[in-house]
């Protein structure tokens, strides 16, 4: 039993030595300022479209389209992945993060062809999101109807 405890202690020391350090506050700060910057850019686009004469609904739609386009281009240029490595969770703001996941899947499976590669794999990523959104909206609708 003594040997088992010694081996366990040695193993724990090796694990601690080779495990990556987790810098929680640094990661939180990076995620916060990058995610906040993405949101501020989105708000700036929304204000700009509103200034151009679009109503609030149209400005929101144009902002969404613009953010999806920018995230897609940055993903295609391999810049969004670098932002993601730096910012972690701060880069997965729903609009831009979803666009990144869709374009990444399309780029990865492009070599398999447009139908069986890109077409099939795009919906394997989007499918769970659409299903979750649909089920979530039904649940919220039922709760709204009841209450």
Image (tube, grey):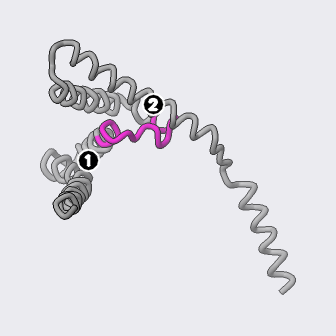
Nearer to me, 75 or 33: 33
Q: Which residues are magenta?
A: 83-98
Q: Which mark is residue 53?
A: none
Question: Eyeballing the image, is 102 above or below 59?
Answer: below
**Which residue occupies the extreme bottom position in the image?**
1
For the question of whether residue 142 can be seen, the reply is yes
Residue 57 position within the rendered picture, expressed as x and y whole percent measured from the top left: 17, 30
Q: Is residue 67 left or right of residue 17?
A: left
Q: Are marks 2 and 1 in contact (CB under 8 Å)?
A: no
Relative to 132, is 44 above or below? above
**Quadrant containing the C terminus in the rendered view:** bottom left
Reading the image, the residue beneath label 2 is 36
Quadrant (top left/top right/bottom left/bottom right) for the N terminus: bottom right
Looking at marks 2 and 1 on the same chain, the residue that comes earlier in the sequence is marked by 2
- Image depth: mark 2 or mark 1 in front: 2
Structural distance between the alpha carbons of marks 2 and 1: 32 Å
């Amino acid at each position: 039993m003594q040997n088992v405890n010694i081996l366990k202690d040695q193993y724990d020391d090796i694990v601690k030595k080779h495990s990556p350090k987790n810098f929680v506050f640094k990661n939180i700060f990076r995620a916060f300022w990058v995610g906040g910057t993405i949101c501020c850019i989105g708000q700036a686009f929304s204000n700009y479209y509103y200034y151009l004469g679009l109503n609030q609904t149209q400005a929101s739609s144009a902002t969404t389209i613009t953010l999806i386009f920018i995230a897609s281009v940055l993903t295609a240029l391999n810049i969004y992945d670098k932002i993601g490595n730096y910012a972690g969770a701060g880069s997965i703001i729903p609009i831009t993060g979803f666009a990144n996941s869709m374009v990444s899947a399309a780029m990865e499976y492009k070599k398999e062809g447009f139908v069986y590669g890109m077409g099939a794999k795009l919906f394997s990523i989007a499918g769970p999101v659409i299903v979750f959104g649909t089920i979530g909206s039904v649940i919220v609708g039922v709760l709204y109807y009841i209450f």
